[in-house]
Image (tube, grey):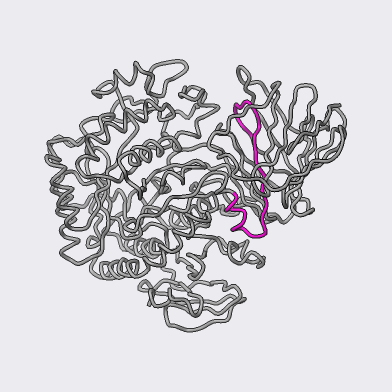
Amino acid sequence: MGKIVLEKNKLVFQRRDELVVIEAYGKNCLRCRATRNAKVSEENWTLLPPAETDACTVTGDERFATIVNGDIKATIEAGFPWYGGVICFYRKDKLILRTKCEGDYVNKYVHAEGNHYATKVIFEANPGEHFYGLGQETEDAFDRKGSTCELVHYNTKSTLPFLYSSLGYGFFWNNPSPGRCETTRNHTMWCSDSTYQADYLVFVGDTPADVMKTYADLTGYAPQFPQWAAGFWQCKLRYESQEELLAVAREYKRRGIPIEAIVIDYFHWTEQGEWKFDPKYWPDPAAMCKELKEMGIRPIVSIWPTTNPNSENYEEMNERNMLVRTENGQFGTFNFYGQQTFIDPMNPETRKFVWDKIKKHYYDCGIHDFWLDEAEPEVHPQQFGHLHFYLGNGAQTALLYPYYYVQMVYDGLREEGEEEIISLTRAAYPGSQRFGAAVWNGDIMSDWTALRQSVTSGLSMGMCGIPWWNSDIGGFHAGDTESEEFRELLVRWFQFGLFSPIMRLHGSRRRTANQPEPNPGIIERSGGPNEIWCFGDENYERIKKLIETREKLRPYIMKYMDVASKTGSPIMRPMFYDFYEDERCYTLEDQYMFGEDILFAPIMAKGQVEREVYLPAGSWVCVIDGKRYTGAQTVTIHADIDHYVAFVKEGSEALEMLV
């Protein structure tokens, strides 16, 4: 039947084939670990130790016990053999979570290998509950209630196993194993493919901001956001040479268009896994960086974690186990211009080795900011149990890859004395934010669906502790710069980019009929033109104005980026974040707050010039015509292609920045 033991700040429940430990962990937070092994593991993964814990009380006996830590309480009952170990979590004495027995034990374990098990933890469903989080993917599901989510990374999908509940609690599944989360009508279930133990934290707060601050206490805060990064970033697939890149930068400056960064994308290198410029097309990177700096433009270079036997570094890295290995088979895990494998940044030796190459060939030339592509990593097929990392088999650790990948660059830059660090990265894991990860949602399509899904992706990432987020303005795949529909889409996406944490133009555009052929010997040719003067004269003026508005908005953006670094509250936030007492706000997925004062309602359909907007309580000013509206109502706003739908709280200085 099992027995409960009361200890200082913790409850321990043990029975045949299971050990459960519930303990206080920081303010208003409880951590639960459950395993089929004889003892729990002390491995924290990316979880930080608690700075301090509320006054904790433990009461009860061996049959039923209670632990209280601030505003959160949990009870556990020994029960009968199959139903023992039921845990109930309470927020200020209101039940918010209860483990559920479906068939046999509450927690289920199926042996995987060694002392690791495929593990499930199941909770009762709460009617009317809303869930937000779980990272980003190309789907229309900001409210995760009624859905399932595979806990994996791949291009366009980045999993962060955290949920915020409308009942006022956060839930962090502290297992870097691939798995699944179901937030369906009959239960909420978290599954790990292979883990030593189930490990999760539940924490409560009076407001969403309170809960997100606790989450940041547990996983880390974003550092100070660089001032330059709040401006406009120019990017395309891809600039083939040093001279082409400089010509574009010079043209931006000649036209007087505010620009802060320009990106040197992939295949500027000699070989994958060498992390240096091809001198044939990039003969003098130091001179290039010097000229860009004189223009006030920061160069950003894309690095990939791929390598193969043609790389001058491959043999040494292979012999020193600095690469992701396979449990059975050869090195290849990604076929892209030959079979590639990936560096293993979970290995501290790998991080130092690769950073030394980056420093020598990029940093010392003047490039201090990086684009970390392929950060998932992109393996094919996705058989994580076939991969072997420094920290263990991929079925147990694969989700950690982007965390250590961005840490590699962050630690290297810190060693060089850099203080404002930002790295554009295609995937993240809880804790990535503390290494300056600026996540984007991958190689999405250039269509209206992808624009709509980018809005929900950005909001979801904000509710997962990732305040630095962006999408490719215009989408990535197959944009036709000569198409009127794409040109309309691009302007609407730029309007969204204006109210995104980072405003960055990118994409693999279709090549045009009069476009010059690639340079001889180029492996990966460029896409079509992607500078703001390439989409028609009318669009040029519209986009230029949006970039100029972004410049005026930068003090406001920096204010809320500082808030994010101090409190964990994202600048791009769902309506319920500030208006948590308004039930309607929990159902809104196509409008959001940008900081506390700006409400943005993007237009995301071809030919659309009107849309409804829900205004919460308060007094609001429409930026289109300056008209004032009283809140707690839905209004219909007309916005042709020259306008965007945004409201500002009356009296806010942000209004002057937008008109």
Find out whether residue 268 is within the magenta segment. Answer: no
Q: Which residue is drawn at 62% across and 45% down?
A: 52
- Seen in the picture, residue 582 relative to 183 is either above or below; the reply is below
User: Would residue 317 appear left or right of 393 to someone viewing this image?
Assistant: left
Residue 578 position within the rendered picture, expressed as x and y whole percent measured from the top left: 58, 65
- Seen in the picture, residue 590 relative to 643 is either above or below; the reply is above
- Seen in the picture, residue 134 relative to 453 is either above or below; the reply is above
Q: Looking at the picture, tell me which residue is in the foreground, 472 or 361.
A: 361
Pick the quarter of the image with the C terminus.
bottom left
Residue 489, quarter of picture: bottom left
Pick the quarter of the image with the N terminus.
top right
Farthest bottom residue in view: 627
Find out whether residue 201 is within the magenta segment. Answer: yes
Q: Looking at the picture, tell me which residue is in the foreground, 576 or 260.
A: 260
Residue 614, quarter of picture: bottom right
Span shown in magenta? 191-214
Residue 239 position within the rendered picture, expressed as x and y whole percent measured from the top left: 21, 46
How many discs appear? 0
User: Would residue 229 appear left or right of 190 to someone viewing this image?
Assistant: left
Residue 642 position within the rendered picture, expressed as x and y whole percent measured from the top left: 35, 73
Residue 635, quarter of picture: bottom right
User: Would residue 320 appear left or right of 428 to someone viewing this image?
Assistant: left
